[in-house]
Structure formats: structure tokens, C-alpha cells
């Protein structure tokens, strides 16, 4: 009997990479997406060197570069010292073919993925929101909401890439262990170009008044970019006060004074989580990306970890679906990616957040001096960047059976 199509819930970056990896190996895929097209959110744009090599391996990289910025460095500063540090990525050539980061909005990433998948047996069903899934020993019944009403689709395997509020995960009763930070983040998008002053990426430490500044390209056109600023929202601050136009202007003016008001395209407040699913596999349902884990965005580890999930899962899934390997191999995927998230991704992102918002002057001075020492010490810089770019996490995962 012919095997049924694999269903993937979610047409974001992780869903796209999972679909492309499976389709390249001859596995038919149907992607279920709640929206009218592939994910158009901006969200995390930063792809580390390890991930860039992976994207090159699956034929993704050249198309991404039509819009992306190749980033050879990143910057750190601390308002306490009025100084800036530039960390060059060139030492990553010791391990990676592409010793740089790639900076591109998810809007372009998913569009490229959609176009690449047109050459394979990949079906997209838009306005098909996964509501829940039930399963038995040999199939999964997936209930979806469509413009024509609810439908039930059948598959042998469902891969949930449907984000932090994943209905796929919730329908399986999988706990989402961890916590939510008391403080929240404010994200502002503007068309003002801060690159001449801050570079394309800078982490600015300043106790509770920290900033993250990044310029994000999202298409091949000269004007296809947006400047993002992220800062903290302290417990007790009211949404209406935080989003007040005067406050938004104050946040931007605090970066660089301007005689005229900044043109603000978007401003949103969001909760910040550190969570990992109790399991990434329950029977014939698998999780990847934000459906399986969430973390604060300092350092871009969450997006990259999701891509690593998709590639790890696809490799093992091909062996099961096409080559007849025992599906216990998918439990290895669960152990490798889940344990790695707890040991590395959660730890690194918490470290990054705390570094940016540290209030103790002595600890800030020690952290800044540590970063400053990396500028002229290639071995120390490689060690720092190899962990930051998630090379260590991939080695750790590979050792788990």
C-alpha cells in the first residue's frame, strides 16, 4: 500500500527546512498553514555560521544571498564605559566553510523556501489551521479549520512546526516545561537607518535600559529593509504607557537624537519565555522549532536551533520512512535535540540576557573586559564564537544516543 503524505503544520522557516529536506529525499509532503501565504512575520533574522553551512548543503544559501547581508562581525557596547567592541567572525573558518553570519528577514526566507519546493512533490494548503490531532498505531487524524469549514486529514506522520502556541503540541498533551520572565520586550521597527552609528547588529548593555539594534533586509530591493530596536519592559509598566507615541520616540531618541520625530512602522510588546517540551515525539507526532522550545531572542539561538531540529529530524525520518529503519530512531532525535536545548540553548540565551541587563558595575566591567580581550586573542575568540554560533551544541547532540 502506498504511503501517505507527511503532514507538516506551519510554513515558517523550520517547516520550510523540514519540508525541503524530506522532499529532496523523495518523500511527499503537505504543508498546512493557517495564513493565506507562507509566514510573512519578520521575527528572528540571524543565521549563525553552522546554520549557514547547513543551508548551503540543501541548496538554500544562494537564493537567500539575493537579499541577505553577509555579516563578518557583531558589536557590543556598555553605556557605563562609553566604549564599543567589535567581534570578528573570521576565526570560525577553523570549522565552517562559511565563517560569517547571514542576516535576512523570515519574510524572504520563507518565500525562497516556497519557491524551492515547487520543483518537488510538496503541496501547500493555505488557510488550513491545525486545530488538533488524534492518533492510533498506524495513522494520525488532523483536524483543520478552513474557509469552507472544518476538515479532517489523515497521515502516517505529523510534524508540528506551528510555533510557540502550537496546537499540535497541545493536542498531544505534551507539557511545556520552563518559565516566563517577569519583564517583557518592546520591539520597534523604523525606517531610520542606524547602521552608520551602530553597525548592523549591536548589543548595548545599560542595566534595565539595555538595547538591541539590528538592521534587517527582507527582500532584494534597495529599500527592502527595516531597522529594529528591542528594549525591556519592566514589571508593572502598562501597555498603554509603553506604546504611547511619546515613549516610543523617547526610546529611539535615546539611541540617537533627531530634530524630527522618527517614523515608526510597528511597535509591539511580547512575553519572553524559556521553555522546552517534555518530549519532541509522541507516537506519530513530532515537534520542531518553537513548537518544541522557546527562549529569549538574545543571540538568535532559537531560530538556529529550530533549523538544526529540522535537519536532524529529517535525516532520521528518511531512514525510517524510506529505508525501513525502526522508528525508535526518532526517539534519538527527541533525546538529542531536547537535551541539547536544555544544556546549551536555554543556558546561553539566559547568559546573553543577563549580560545585557546587569546592574552591578563591577560585573558589567568584568563582562566588558572579557569581551574586549577577545578582540585580539584568536583562540579565545574562537572558543566564545564556537559556543555562541552553536557549534558546541551540535557536537553535544551528536554524542547522545
Image (cartoon, rainbow, N blue to C red):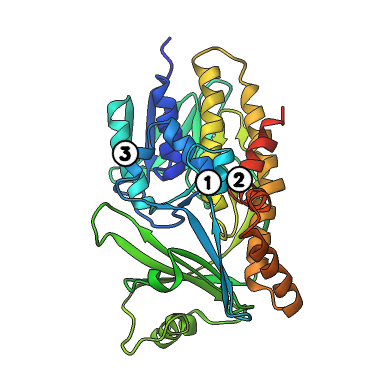
Q: Position of residue 392 (x, y in %)?
A: 66, 42
Mark 3 lies on a secondary structure that is: helix
Res. 288 in view: no
Picture mark count: 3
Q: Residue furthest front?
A: 376
Res. 400 in view: yes
The residue to which callout 3 is attached is: 114
Residue 374 picture quarter: bottom right
Residue at 68% x, 48% y is: 344
Q: Mark 1 and mark 3 in contact (Cβ < 8 Å)?
A: no
Judge the density around disc 2: few (<14), some (14-19), many (≥20) Cα neighbours within 10 Å: many
Mark 1 lies on a secondary structure that is: helix
Of callouts 3 and 1, the N-terminal one:
3
Residue 228 picture quarter: bottom left
In the rendering, which numbered label is found on residue 390? 2
Q: CA distance from mark 2 to mark 1?
A: 8 Å
Residue at 56% x, 34% y is: 286
Q: Mark 1 and mark 2 in contact (Cβ < 8 Å)?
A: yes
Judge the density around disc 3: few (<14), some (14-19), many (≥20) Cα neighbours within 10 Å: many
Which quadrant of the rendered structure holds the C terminus? top right
Q: Position of residue 237 (x, y in %)?
A: 56, 82
Q: Residue furthest right?
A: 362
Along the line of sight, the residue nearer the viewer: 275 or 195: 195
Q: Position of residue 167 (x, y in %)?
A: 51, 46
Mark 3 or mark 1: which is in front?
1
Along the line of sight, the residue nearer the viewer: 156 or 393: 393
The residue to which callout 1 is attached is: 304
Residue at 39% x, 57% y is: 42
Of callouts 2 and 1, the N-terminal one:
1
Q: Position of residue 399 (x, y in %)?
A: 71, 31
Mark 2 or mark 1: which is in front?
2
Amino acid at each position: 500500500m502506498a504511503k501517505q503524505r507527511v503532514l507538516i503544520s506551519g510554513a515558517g522557516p523550520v517547516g520550510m527546512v523540514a519540508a525541503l529536506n524530506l522532499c529532496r529525499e523523495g518523500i511527499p509532503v503537505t504543508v498546512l498553514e493557517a495564513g493565506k501565504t507562507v509566514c510573512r512575520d519578520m521575527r528572528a533574522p540571524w543565521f549563525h555560521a553552522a546554520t549557514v553551512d547547513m543551508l548551503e548543503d540543501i541548496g538554500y544559501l544562494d537564493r537567500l544571498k539575493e537579499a541577505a547581508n553577509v555579516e563578518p562581525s557583531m558589536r557590543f557596547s556598555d553605556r557605563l564605559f562609553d566604549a564599543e567592541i567589535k567581534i570578528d567572525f573570521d576565526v570560525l573558518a577553523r570549522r565552517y566553510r562559511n565563517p560569517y553570519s547571514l542576516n535576512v528577514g523570515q519574510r524572504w526566507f520563507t518565500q525562497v523556501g516556497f519557491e524551492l519546493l515547487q520543483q518537488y512533490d510538496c503541496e501547500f494548503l493555505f488557510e488550513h489551521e491545525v486545530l488538533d490531532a488524534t492518533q492510533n498505531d498506524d495513522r494520525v487524524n488532523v483536524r483543520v479549520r478552513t474557509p469552507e469549514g472544518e476538515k479532517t486529514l489523515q497521515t502516517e506522520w505529523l510534524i508540528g512546526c506551528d510555533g510557540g502556541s502550537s496546537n499540535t503540541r497541545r493536542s498531544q498533551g505534551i507539557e511545556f516545561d520552563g518559565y516566563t520572565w517577569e519583564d517583557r520586550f518592546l520591539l520597534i521597527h523604523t525606517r531610520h537607518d542606524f547602521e552608520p552609528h551602530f553597525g548592523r547588529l549591536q548589543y548595548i548593555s545599560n542595566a534595565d535600559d539595555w538595547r538591541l539594534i539590528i538592521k534587517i533586509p527582507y527582500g532584494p530591493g534597495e529599500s527592502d529593509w527595516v531597522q529594529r530596536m528591542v528594549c525591556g519592559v519592566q514589571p508593572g509598566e502598562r501597555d498603554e504607557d509603553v506604546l504611547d507615541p511619546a515613549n516610543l520616540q523617547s526610546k529611539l531618541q535615546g539611541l540617537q537624537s533627531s530634530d524630527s520625530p522618527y517614523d515608526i512602522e510597528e511597535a509591539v510588546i511580547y512575553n519572553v519565555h524559556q521553555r522546552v517540551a517534555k518530549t519532541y515525539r509522541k507516537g506519530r507526532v513530532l515537534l520542531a522549532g518553537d513548537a518544541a522550545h522557546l527562549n529569549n531572542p538574545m543571540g538568535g539561538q532559537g531560530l538556529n536551533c529550530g533549523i538544526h531540529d529540522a535537519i536532524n529530524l529529517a535525516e532520521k525520518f528518511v531512514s525510517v520512512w524510506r529505508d525501513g529503519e525502526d522508528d525508535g530512531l526518532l526517539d534519538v532525535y527527541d533525546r538529542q535535540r531536547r537535551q541539547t536545548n536544555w544544556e546549551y540553548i536555554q543556558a546561553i540565551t539566559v547568559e546573553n540576557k543577563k549580560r545585557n541587563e546587569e546592574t552591578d558595575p563591577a560585573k558589567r566591567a568584568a563582562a566588558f573586559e572579557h569581551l574586549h580581550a577577545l578582540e585580539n586573542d584568536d583562540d579565545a575568540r574562537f572558543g566564545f564564537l564556537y559556543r555562541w554560533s552553536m557549534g558546541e551544541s551540535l557536537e553535544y547532540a551528536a554524542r547522545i544516543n
